[in-house]
Image: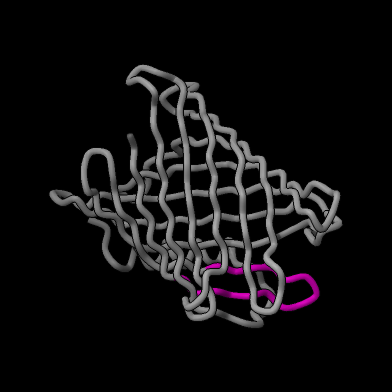
Amino acid sequence: MMNSKAVASLAAMTLSMTAPSHAQDESDFQAWSAVFLTARPAETSRLLLWFDGHARFRDDAGDLGVSILRPGVGWRVSDGLDLWTGYARVVSRSDGAADVEEHRLWQQATYPVTGILGGRLTGRTRLEQRFRDSGEDTGWRVRQFVRWERRIEGSPFSVLAADELFINVNDADWGQQSGFDQNRLFIGGALRLSKWSRFEGGYLNNIINLAGSDDRMNHNIFFQLFVNL
């Protein structure tokens, strides 16, 4: 089993590679929750179905800040590569302002990377096209996600570490600016509930680039349920 020093080293290495060098301006404690559903119409089918839904509570986890609904379909190219496409509706809420509704088209690839530190490293590369009523431009964004998981031998528990880097490809008239957008670092654990489901929870550090201001750092408790039908 990997010792605590190795876990700490992995977390520190990830932070040093992904966190920007700017000073952080504000911070908020938030609670994020998500449900992920995947399915295959038949056991041998290459067609895949996807849905994830999110509720994120801001201002010390007291108010709903962001809700997301994201359906999609995929195709199993091989045992090591799945390709996906879909749509997402994202609603962001803040005090004293109208809700911001965003529509996204997205495409992604999910794949294994390698075995490392006694666990398994996997990746997801996602491309998004973002649309808002407040502008006419399409905002293009790339998201690179990596996840490391190690099963605790003889138990249904696993230890997890994951990181997702967001890069805006272009400027958009509704506010998107090219370059670093945000980073999400997650450290936690997983409990396998059954052959088809697992529960994950832990801490998520979210650094967001704010145009014309210092970066914002949010500290989040993150819980998610995965169901594979």
Judge whether 82 appears above or below 146 on screen: above
Judge whether 117 appears above or below 26 on screen: above
Q: Nearer the viewer, residue 167 or 197?
A: 197
Q: How many marks?
A: 0
Q: Is residue 141 left or right of residue 111?
A: right
Q: Nearer the viewer, residue 156 or 6?
A: 156
Q: Nearer the viewer, residue 133 or 138?
A: 133
Residue 186 picture quarter: bottom left
**Residue 150 at x, y percent in the picture:** 30, 50
**Residue 166 at x, y percent in the picture:** 64, 55
User: Which residues are drawn in magenta?
Assistant: 206-220
Q: Is residue 212 left or right of residue 86?
A: right
Magenta region, mostly helix, strand or loop?
Answer: strand
How is the structure coloured here? Answer: one colour
**Residue 141 within the magenta-colored segment of the rendering:** no
The N terminus: image quadrant: bottom left
**Residue 49 at x, y percent in the picture:** 46, 31
Please report the residue visible at 49 percent of the width from the left and 42 percent of the height from the top: 123
**Residue 53 at x, y percent in the picture:** 48, 51
Q: Hey, which residue is sitting farthest top in the picture?
A: 44
Q: Is residue 105 left or right of residue 156?
A: right
Please report the residue visible at 40 percent of the width from the left and 50 percent of the height from the top: 148
Please report the residue visible at 43 percent of the width from the left and 55 percent of the height from the top: 34
Q: Is residue 55 left or right of residue 180?
A: left
**Residue 209 within the magenta-colored segment of the rendering:** yes
Q: Hey, which residue is sitting farthest left in the picture?
A: 154
Judge whether 166 appears above or below 126 on screen: below
The C terminus: image quadrant: top left
Q: Nearer the viewer, residue 143 or 28?
A: 28
Please report the residue visible at 57 percent of the width from the left and 80 percent of the height from the top: 27
